[in-house]
Image: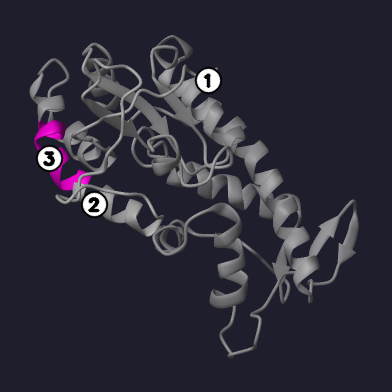
Amino acid sequence: MMASSVAVATAQVATLGFARQASRRCQPAKHMCVRHQLHNAQHFNRSLASTARGHGVASSRRNALKVVAKNPKHKFALLFDCDGVIVDSEELHRLAYNGAFNSFELSIEGKAVVWSAEYYEVLANTVGGGKPKMKYHFNTNMNPTGIIGGVWPEYVEKGIKMPAPTDDKAKAALVDALQDQKTELYKKIVEDLAVARPGVLALMDEAIAREDIAVGICSAATLAGFEKVVNSVVGKERLAKLDIILAGDQVGGIYLTQYI
């Protein structure tokens, strides 16, 4: 499924933040969509260079990150995130988390653990990543009385009622099991419910059609769930035309690793 090696922008980079804005307001057939991204590329390039310096990457005196395109025709790059950009997936993730909690019969003081839509919106904007979300929830939000370490749930494993974990190793093991179950449920939910956000695929197709733009999908999501989304929503024919496709557990620092 993975596309060929990345061909990267040299002087300017058009990124997701601009893609997200443009997809909301641009007509699919208009070239103005991609031009809007490129107009803003210089600002993003300065930001990327600043991040790169923190990783020990040299930049020019004008704070422009020096990279070399593998395809000399590519002058720009348009990178799409997956969750929230290609697919409005937060509700799908919430359903999958609650499904995993139900599978393990998580409960605290006899009450089932369920993340409401209102609560999950706040949680998703506070903590990134599935495992960190769960750890944050139990360590921080389930801590109404100031108990050190928060309040962790009881659960059922292989039909046996298990007490709430108390040490870090047991807590990590429970979170790992919940995340694995959540991922499997998420893949099933995606097949039934996931659709592309309006205008995103049209913008992607417009960029792919231009020889001077490298196009890719880079997500911090795990490969198992991410792959299911892009196969289902973006489609294998379109994916085959991309210059790069990367999930968060394939590499570290996905927005820098392949471009330096």
Indicate the amino acid at tag 2.
Answer: Ser
- Quarter where residue 145 is shown: bottom right
Q: Nearer the viewer, residue 211 or 135?
A: 211
What residue is rendered at 90% in x and 51% in y?
158
> Residue 196 location, x and y as percent?
36, 27
Residue density around tag 3, few if under 14, some if 14–19, many if 20 or more, within 10 Å: some
Q: Nearer the viewer, mark 2 or mark 3?
A: 2
Does 38 lie within the magenta span? yes
Colour scheme in use: one colour
Q: Inspect the image, locate mark 1, and give the three-letter code of the amino acid beneath it.
A: Met
Mark 1: few/some/many CA within 10 Å (<14, 14-19, 20+): few
Residue depicted at x 64% and y 45% = 182
Could you say where residue 231 lies in the image, as x and y percent from the top left?
50, 21
Name the residue type under label 3.
Answer: Asn
Badges 3 and 1: C-beta atoms under 8 Å apart? no
Per the rendered image, the range of residues in magenta is 36-45
Location of mark 2 (residue): 47
Q: Nearer the viewer, residue 45 or 199?
A: 45
Q: Residue at 54% x, 40% y: name it.
A: 251
The residue under label 1 is: 2
**Residue 252 versus residue 98: which sits nearer the camera?**
252
Residue 36 x, y percent position in the rendering = 10, 32
Where is 57 relative to 191, above or below? Answer: below
Instruction: Give the mark nearer the N terminus: 2 vs 3.
Output: 3
Residue 55 sits in which quadrant? bottom left
Mark 3 highlights which residue?
Answer: 40
Left or right: residue 3 compared with residue 178: left
